[in-house]
Image: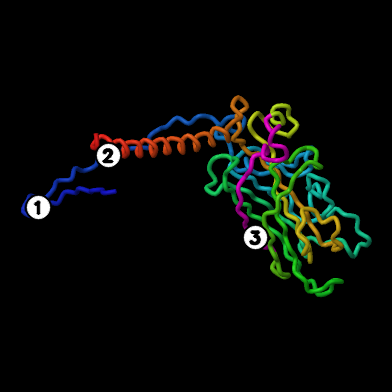
């Protein structure tokens, strides 16, 4: 990029410049008519976007959910742990007990921001432009609260672990959800709020289960979709004290200091109902390229063989 700036320079030998004087002021202030105030506040024509990507609790899926956008923020819906401090606990879409498990005594009830909790989950496109779409690399930003002190627990002085999972088929029927392991974050006590990030690639819900009937599942709605070309997907954080066994749901974990939270987000599918052969087209394109290359090689060798034969005869 090359840019120029031109400017004039006054010759010292030239006569001085004559700057015209401004007009004299008017004798009094100019009268400007003022409209009377309206009876109701003026409506702003701009559409506020501040809460566009903040999740709302979904009564069907039983967890926070965002509509299609470039990112999804759980807001304050996951802040805290258990029914004492977390809204709509347990906020898990497949009835995973987690922080809502039955506790044997009041001493086992976690205390807000003294014991472990998942406070916030945000998922976003890397450049925060365009909607969340399949085959797109995204980033999940997760905020957890570290236990203040673990020295007095029955299993003292251990660290907490946050196991992160992802599902591309967050159906209404939680029994059919397939969770894929992404990452485990180790959190030492006394950190307060701890933030970490995980990157992964969004998959199509058609990749789950039997690929042969994926198109049929899409058309008959057996996989829950919102609209013709979107699906509900989810990210889960299973966060607990001394939870060294990696799992999407801590059914067999004795520790009461566990918080399991999900965030559901809408994803644009790269599937077109009128043309469900995207993968086949891509594969055929590669095969065609290979075939064209082979044809050129065969033709090249045929030409080399014909030249010496023409010389001999």
Mark 3 = which residue?
A: 195
Above or below 153: residue 60: above
Mark 1 = which residue?
A: 11
Snapshot quadrant of residue 226: top right
Q: Residue at x 73, y 41 (%)?
A: 170
Cβ–Cβ under 8 Å for marks 2 and 3:
no
Mark 2–mark 3 Cα distance, whole angstroms, equals: 73 Å
> Which quadrant, please, contains the C terminus?
top left
Image: magenta residue range: 193-215
Residue lying furthest right: 104
Cβ–Cβ under 8 Å for marks 1 and 3:
no
- Local secondary structure at mark 2: helix
Residue 43 lies in magenta, yes or no? no
Mark 2 = which residue?
A: 308
Q: Residue at x 14, y 51 (%)?
A: 9
Of 265 and 48, the residue lying toward us:
265
Q: Nearer the viewer, mark 2 or mark 3?
A: 2
Of 228 and 31, the residue lying toward us:
228
Q: Which mark is residue 176?
A: none
Snapshot quadrant of residue 227: top right
Left or right of 115 in this view: 266: left
Mark closest to the chain's N terminus, 1 or 3: 1
- Local secondary structure at mark 3: strand
Of 37 and 45, the residue lying toward us:
45
Mark closest to the chain's N terminus, 2 or 3: 3
Q: Callout 3 environment at 10 Å: few (<14), some (14 to 19), or many (20+)?
A: some
């Amino acid at each position: 990029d090359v840019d120029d700036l031109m400017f004039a320079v006054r010759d010292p030998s030239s006569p001085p410049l004559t700057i015209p004087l401004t007009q004299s002021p008017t004798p009094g202030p100019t009268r400007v008519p003022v409209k009377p105030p309206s009876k109701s506040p003026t409506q702003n024509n701009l559409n506020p976007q501040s809460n566009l990507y903040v999740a709302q609790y979904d009564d069907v899926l039983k967890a926070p959910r965002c509509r299609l956008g470039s990112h999804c923020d759980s807001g304050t819906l996951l802040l805290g742990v258990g029914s004492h401090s977390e809204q709509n606990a347990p906020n898990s879409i497949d009835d995973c007990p987690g922080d809502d498990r039955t506790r044997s005594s009041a001493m086992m009830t976690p205390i807000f921001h003294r014991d472990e909790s998942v406070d916030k989950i945000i998922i976003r496109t890397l450049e925060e432009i365009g909607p969340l779409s399949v085959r797109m690399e995204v980033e999940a930003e997760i905020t957890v609260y570290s236990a203040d002190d673990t020295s007095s627990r029955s299993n003292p002085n251990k660290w907490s672990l946050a196991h992160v999972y992802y599902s591309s088929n967050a159906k209404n029927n939680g029994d059919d959800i397939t969770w894929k392991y992404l990452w485990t974050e180790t959190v030492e006590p006394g950190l307060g709020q701890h933030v970490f990030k995980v990157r992964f690639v969004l998959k199509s819900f058609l990749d789950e289960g039997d690929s042969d009937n994926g198109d049929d599942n899409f058309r008959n709605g057996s996989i829950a979709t919102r609209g013709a070309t979107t699906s509900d997907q989810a990210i889960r954080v299973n966060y607990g004290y001394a939870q060294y066994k990696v799992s999407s749901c801590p059914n067999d974990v004795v520790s009461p200091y566990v918080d399991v939270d999900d965030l559901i987000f809408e994803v644009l599918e790269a599937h077109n109902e009128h043309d469900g052969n995207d993968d086949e087209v891509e594969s055929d394109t590669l095969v065609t390229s290979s075939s064209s290359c082979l044809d050129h090689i065969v033709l090249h060798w045929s030409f080399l063989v014909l030249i010496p034969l023409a010389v001999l005869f």
